[in-house]
Amino acid sequence: MSVEHSLLGKDTNYPTEYQPDILFPIARATARASYSHVEGIQQGKDWWHVFEISWLNAQGIPQVAIGRLTLPATSPNLIESKSLKLYFNSMNFTAFDSKEAFKATVEKDLSAAAGADVTIDLFHADDVQISDPQGFCIDELVPSELENHPNAALLAFDQTDDADVDVQFYSHLLRSNCPVTGQPDWGTVFIRYKGKKPAYESILAYIISYRQHNGFHEQCVEQMYADIWQNLKPEKLMVYAAYTRRGGLDINPCRVSDLTWMPRPIRLARQ
């Protein structure tokens, strides 16, 4: 089914009984059609932080946790976020014998929806720490041109320095739109790059060009990865976007050309 058949953007009654069939998978293949050949496009993970998790223990007492979901980029499906929120809300009044039983149920249901093994790590409400961004920020640079829709032609090499670099940098200026509701999504994008030195202001212009783009978080990251890989031809590349929270969820897709560059999941102050 296409996303138009999902509950996204529609008035919805929040379920109060466990409802795994509310999960709505979206095939990755459609969005990947134009860049499925790009090396590393299916290498990486999608990390989700779930801040509104609650269930009942065997005595009927509410339990709460923060969850970190890990979906492999090789999964045939991503999971639509509103359906995931409703799924977790449907468990608020369901009793489980233990936290382990709750975890096993979630992993079974989400793996079925994604078509691959999905894991969840559960943290105490006080345990997830804020991380400092790693690398250097490019947000103070001044691009020579700006656009409001993704344009890979903006990407360029540094004409004043043809040295090879191995660097990580980031921008807080990522903005895109939900393709169904049009609501804005905000994020910080990290890029680790090894190859001929890029013009960092051109990469900033490219990131800003997503400002009116309609796309799911995972699709935006894959498009960024594919465009940088194909236009700048780095030896190695990592693109990781830490999107801000909506509806108790934040989504953090990461794609890498080399699995040794796979970072650890983080949580930023804006999330």
Image (cartoon, grey):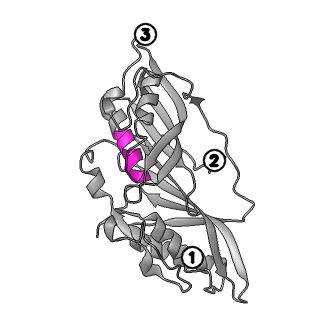
Amino acid at circle 1: Asn
Magenta stretch: includes residue 220 = yes
165 lies above or below 85: above
C-beta proximity under 8 Å, tags 1 and 3: no
51 lies above or below 239: below
Residue 20, position as x, y percentages in the image: 46, 80
Residue stretch rendered in magenta on the structure: 213-226
Amino acid at circle 3: Thr
* Marking on residue 270: 2
- Within 10 Å of disc 1 (Cα), the crowding (few <14, some 14-19, many 20+) is many
Q: Nearer the viewer, residue 100 or 11?
A: 11
Magenta stretch: includes residue 221 = yes
Residue that label 1 marks: 89
Q: How many marks?
A: 3
Q: Is residue 219 left or right of residue 171?
A: left
Q: Which sits earlier in the primary sequence, circle 3 or circle 2?
A: 3
Q: Is residue 95 left or right of residue 251?
A: right
Amino acid at circle 2: Arg
Residue 71, position as x, y percentages in the image: 46, 60
Which residue sits at x=52%, y=37%? Answer: 173
Q: Which sits earlier in the primary sequence, circle 1 or circle 3?
A: 1
Give the CA separation, mark 1 to mark 3.
54 Å
Give the CA separation, mark 1 to mark 2.
24 Å
Residue that label 3 marks: 160
Q: Which of the 4 quarters of the picture holds residue 116?
A: bottom left
